[in-house]
Amino acid sequence: MFANVVALLALFFALGGTAWATKHYLIGSTKQIKPSVLSHLRGAVGPTGPTGPSGVTGPAGSTGASGATGAPGTNLTAQTTLPSGQSESGVFAGSGGDTTGDWVPIQMEFTQPLAAPLSTSKIIDTTTSGNGTTCTGPGHAAAGYLCIYNILTVNASGYGTASADNSLPSPDPGEIYFFQVSGAPNYVEGTWTVTAP
């Protein structure tokens, strides 16, 4: 009798264990899970990871096509006047005379002439500091002005120009400016800049 009970219990657990085991599966791929179930199993998106290192520089690109040929330039001559608003500069130096009242003439030759001579009121004699308005410093001159910047004057001072009085031709090839001597020795030097009106 006892032996029969044990045998029945053994058979019960054997059958029950098999049934229990058949309800558990080993999942090796998401393809084994129903898509509607899989969508509920996914977690939240994690934070963005750090930026990766820069890649190596790629090879240089090929040379681009040549651009179109530019328009021909203007053929400059000795009579081509300085365009309006454009400037040109030069230097001067000289000495002369031994007594008060003598003159030191300075010639300022324009590489490109002005369309017409400047009036004497447009020729400014100043130092390298300029006058703060029409002549603000070496290399600068307001439109329509000639600025004479004295670097060194010894026993001489600026007097004026004879160019406008002597009716220089048009185009204007340059200016002649005079320094009046006050003794000996004497010497003048500096720079000039003119800007076309």
Image (spheres, grey):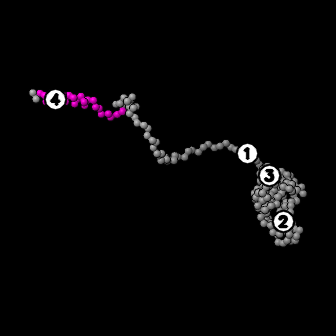
Sequence-first disc among 4 and 2? 4
Report x, y in % for residue 10: 16, 30
Using the rendered view, name the quadrant where residue 124 is placed.
bottom right
User: 9 or 46, which lies in front?
Assistant: 9
Report x, y in % for residue 79: 82, 51
**Circle 4 is placed at which residue position?**
9
Q: The residue under label 4 is which amino acid type?
A: Leu
Instruction: Determine if the magenta segment contains residue 46.
Output: no
Alpha-carbon span between mark 1 and mark 3: 28 Å
Alpha-carbon span between mark 4 and mark 3: 121 Å
Alpha-carbon span between mark 4 and mark 2: 137 Å
Q: The residue under label 3 is which amino acid type?
A: Ala
Viewer can see residue 73: yes
Q: In the image, which disc is placed on residue 157?
A: 2
Sequence-first disc among 4 and 3? 4
Q: Is residue 45 left or right of residue 146?
A: left
Q: Is residue 11 left or right of residue 149?
A: left
Q: Is residue 175 left or right of residue 61?
A: right
Magenta region, residue range: 4-30
* Nearer mark to the viewer, of 4 and 1: 4
Residue at 34% over, 34% down: 29
Q: Are marks 3 and 2 in contact (CB under 8 Å)?
A: no
Q: In the image, which disc is placed on residue 72?
A: 1
Q: The residue under label 2 is which amino acid type?
A: Ser
Alpha-carbon span between mark 3 and mark 2: 25 Å
Sequence-first disc among 3 and 2? 3
Residue at 61% over, 42% down: 65
